[in-house]
Amino acid sequence: MKKITLLRCILGILILLNLWMICGFSSQSAEDSGKTSEKVIRPVAQVIVKDFESKPQQEQENIISSLQLPVRKLAHMTEFGMLGILILLLLRTWKLPLLHCGLWSMLAVLICASADELHQFLAKEGRSGRFTDVLIDCAGALIGCLAVSGILMLVKYIQKRKQKSA
């Protein structure tokens, strides 16, 4: 199997796994989603809040509650950021211009994020689909795509400099 075909297969599988993960999180009820978030937030709180463990239980719960929104939104940005990066890298295997790869990546993420919010709205009680979440998802993808594009451009620049000096 050619290297490029293998790379496309690997990226395709990673994209499907990422979408499966996103769909799995969206399928959770509001209560289960909150419990999942708390599993992440508690260790974060232990690191960023001084003497977290020595605080009264009610204060710990208030701290965890105050961290719910930013941690959940960061999780949205991260999972869709990864999706955008994977799609960008897959499209790059066809030697498309980087800008086109980025634009198609962002369009794909916009469609996936919209479908994800619709899924949340329709699938589970206590969950809602929000346009702001679509924007947050797309912001994560934009950040990821810009970072990877910058790295790819830097690598190309370094390769050209090496060729010129050789």
Image (cartoon, rainbow, N blue to C red):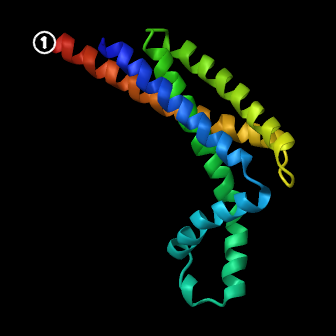
User: Residue 73: in sight, yes or no?
Assistant: yes
Q: Secondary structure at mark 1?
A: loop
Horizontal relation, residue 84 to residue 24: left or right: left
Count of residue discs:
1
Q: Quadrant of residue 7?
A: top left
Counting from the top left corner in percent of width and height, residue 24 is at 65, 45
**Residue drawn at x 30%, y 11% as measured from the top left:** 2
In the rendering, at what x and y percent does residue 4 appear?
35, 14
* Front residue of this view, candidates 4 and 136: 4
Location of the N terminus by quadrant is: top left
Q: Residue at x 50, y 73 (%)?
A: 47
Q: In this rendering, would 96 be left or right of 155?
A: right
| 19 vs 60: above or below | above
Residue under pointer 1:
166
Q: Where 76 falls versus 138 (above or below)? A: below
Relative image position of residue 134 (x, y in whole percent): 75, 37
Q: Nearer the viewer, residue 62 or 19?
A: 19
User: Label 1 amino acid?
Assistant: Ala
* Residue at x-position 42% and y-position 26%: 10
Q: Residue furthest left?
A: 166
Examine the image and state in which quarter residue 102 appears.
top right
- Whether residue 160 is situated above or below residue 154 in the rendered picture: above
In percent of width and height, residue 58 lies at 72, 85
Tell me if residue 101 comes above or below residue 76 in the rendering.
above
